Image (cartoon, helix red, strand yellow):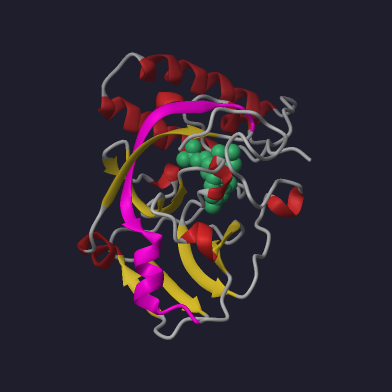
Amino acid sequence: MNAEPPEDPGTPIGRRVLLGTLGLGALGVASAPVLQRTLEGFLGAAADKDPTGLTGLLPNGGGFRYYSVTTSVPRRSATDYRLTVGGLVRRPARYTLADLRALPQTRLVRDVQCVTGWRVPGTPFEGVRLSRLLDAAGVHPSAGAVRFTCFDGAYSESLTLDQARRADVLVALRMQDHDLGHEHGGPARLYVAPMYFYKSAKWLSGITVTEKVRPGYWEDRGYDVDAWVGRSNGRDDVPTD
Ligand SMILES: Nc1nc2c(c(=O)[nH]1)N[C@H]1C(S)=C(S)[C@@H](COP(=O)(O)O)O[C@H]1N2
Ligand SMILES: [Mo]
């Protein structure tokens, strides 16, 4: 069981990408947000061409690392993005990004903690409370959980209904006070503040209310479904809530 892609520096392409990215990274740390965006764009592009996942091990802007379990992810623009809400609900719905932006927004500032050890202090996330979307959909009494699917075509996550209704669980549209970029899961990702960051599914496209929790991508590979920071996965990190 290992959350990280293998650290195999064997392929020449991977090594070239790694060296090139390290050079850019040094620049990015010391310079303006404009260059940072370029760096993030480059990291995304590099990871697309680097299935060994080497670029995933590199520090991204501000301490974040770029993760994707697929070698490429389609881009969804502000106009073609859709989020469906369905399953055990009375009123299935389909939201555009404009629909989501028109709803009340909640801004939270918490540390982010990845289960592999890296932590980023005080990061603003902003978006729509998941509880609001669930209430709008009218959850059926037989429901007990919520499953999340992604337009990368591979990742999934889930929460119990009680966890999903917490005030610190968002469908996030913004991160670090910018619209969520593609690399960080834009246009919209899940944000589960009190749990390890693997719960915060990027490129969110589907919310399905279900009877029971169905383990997600990493949970099928051994990670805890109830992923409270500091109280799961055999780790003792300081909680993020
Ligand atoms: N769709 C999708 N969501 C995902 C992942 C992923 O690979 N695919 N990785 C998870 C993990 S393990 C982490 S640490 C964070 C990384 O988010 P970042 O790439 O914005 O730093 O996204 C989480 N959500
Ligand atoms: Mo992670």
Could you tell me which residue is drawn at 57 percent across and 81 percent down?
Answer: 142
Q: What residue lies at 61% left-to-right and 34% top-to-bottom?
A: 230
Lateral position of residue 97 relative to residue 238, left or right: left
Is residue 126 located in the magenta-colored stretch of the structure? yes
**Up-down relation of residue 167 to residue 212 (above or below):** above
Nearer to me, 237 or 80? 237
* Residue 231 against residue 8 in the figure, above or below: below
- In the rendered image, which quarter is residue 166 located in? bottom left
123 above or below 180?
A: above
Q: Position of residue 240 (x, y in %)?
A: 48, 35
Q: Is the residue 86 above or below the residue 195 in the image?
A: below
Q: Residue 148 at x, y = what percent?
A: 53, 63
52 sits to left or right of 147:
right
Is residue 177 located in the magenta-colored stretch of the structure?
Answer: no
Instruction: Return the x and y of residue 87 as percentages of the image width and height.
Output: 52, 79
Q: Which quadrant is home to the C terminus?
A: top left
Residue range corresponding to the magenta coloring: 116-140
Q: How many marks?
A: 0
Decide if residue 186 is on the left or right side of residue 200. left
Q: Residue at x 20, y 63 (%)?
A: 102
Q: Determine if residue 191 is in view.
A: yes
